[in-house]
Amino acid sequence: MRRWSFVSILVLVVSLAAALAAQSTTKSNTTAPAKSSSLRTVDGQPDLQGVWDFRTVTPMERPSELGNKEVFSDQEAEEFAVKKVQESNVDNLRGKTASGASNGQTTTQDVSLAYNEFWFDRGNKVVGTKRTSLVVDPPDGKIPALTPEAKKRLDAERIARERPAEGPEDRSVGERCIMGFNSGPPMVPAAYNQNMQIFQTAGHVVVLNEMVHNARIIPLDNRPYSNIRQWAGMSRGHWEGNTLVVDTRNFSGVTAFRGSSANLHLIERFTRVDKDTLLYEFTAEDPTTWTRKWTAQIPMVRNPQPIYEYACHEGNYGMEGILSAARAAEREAAKARTKSGR
């Protein structure tokens, strides 16, 4: 039988007291209304800082079977969430997983059970507003139709993806660990690593994404845009009341969002609704891709945990094999031409 010394008992009592105090504090933090002063920075601006979680099973577009239904009831939201989680589990058992293609479209690939539910972190609830889609405009909850120009461009990209890769440019920027498939901008829910962190100073806001640890440094001083195109575009921010508005343009066409071109113009809005909720909204406009601009909303939830480095390197290792195979195929083709006398 184990003997308890006075010191051991004292340590146990102190530990239990600390745990109860922490539990009491946690409960009070999640139920008590936040004071407005606690949601302001030292500069007097709305405090958006912290780690924000944007996991959800709410789809980007409203499922056709829901018709014109914009918002779930509480029971409907719970039933829809259970159904979506079950569907994703079945897909994993079949060895299928959703991944973002280079043009931002969602594709399904058989990966021979390389990924199972352990690796995914999609979330298991609909967004807090209980909307049936993340798209709020158009009212039908659907992304507008592609223009004829966009269809031709995406068809050409699809054909290029279907042939063996001849160079690194033939692989997606996500696979090459350049940009994350959900880091944006805009930021949209996907398979995992669905957290972002905001830092603020008087003159800048920084948006740090967990996926591929991309950090966007957004100046707030009305500086002009340059003509340099960047992977994540060029962002400028300003305050409209309690909302941070971020205007981003000058994208690289390679980092397309759902088929967008380098002409994408993105407006993001960040609003602290309460101490545990950040409403994220974006409006995407690209006349060379969609027939009209469209808007989506994602209520993000405060995450008390820190963000850890996402050290993406899979594509860098795989690229050697992909390119060496392409060079081998070229050598074989050259030998065949030599033998045929061409």
Image (cartoon, rainbow, N blue to C red):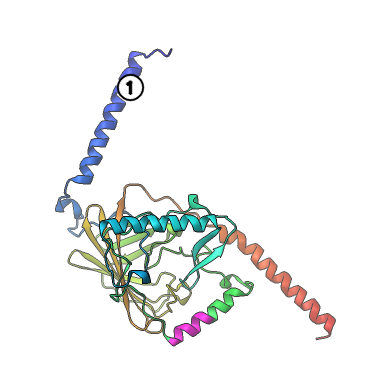
Left or right relative to 226: residue 97: right
**Is 26 drawn above or below residue 143 in the view shown?**
above
Q: Which span of residues is magenta-colored?
A: 148-155
Left or right relative to 47: residue 256: right
Say which of 45 and 314 sits in front: 314
Where does label 1 land, which residue? 11
Which residue: 62% across, 75% down? 163
Q: Residues within 10 Å of mark 1 (few under 14, many from 20)?
A: few
Q: Quadrant of residue 131?
A: bottom left
Which residue: 26% across, 63% down? 203
Q: Quadrant of residue 148?
A: bottom left
The C terminus: image quadrant: bottom right
**In this orientation, does residue 61 appear?**
no
How many circles with numbers are drawn on the protein? 1
Residue 243, x across and y down, in percent: 22, 65
Which residue: 28% across, 75% down? 139
Element type at mark 1: helix
Q: Quadrant of residue 58?
A: bottom left
Which residue: 33% across, 22% down? 11
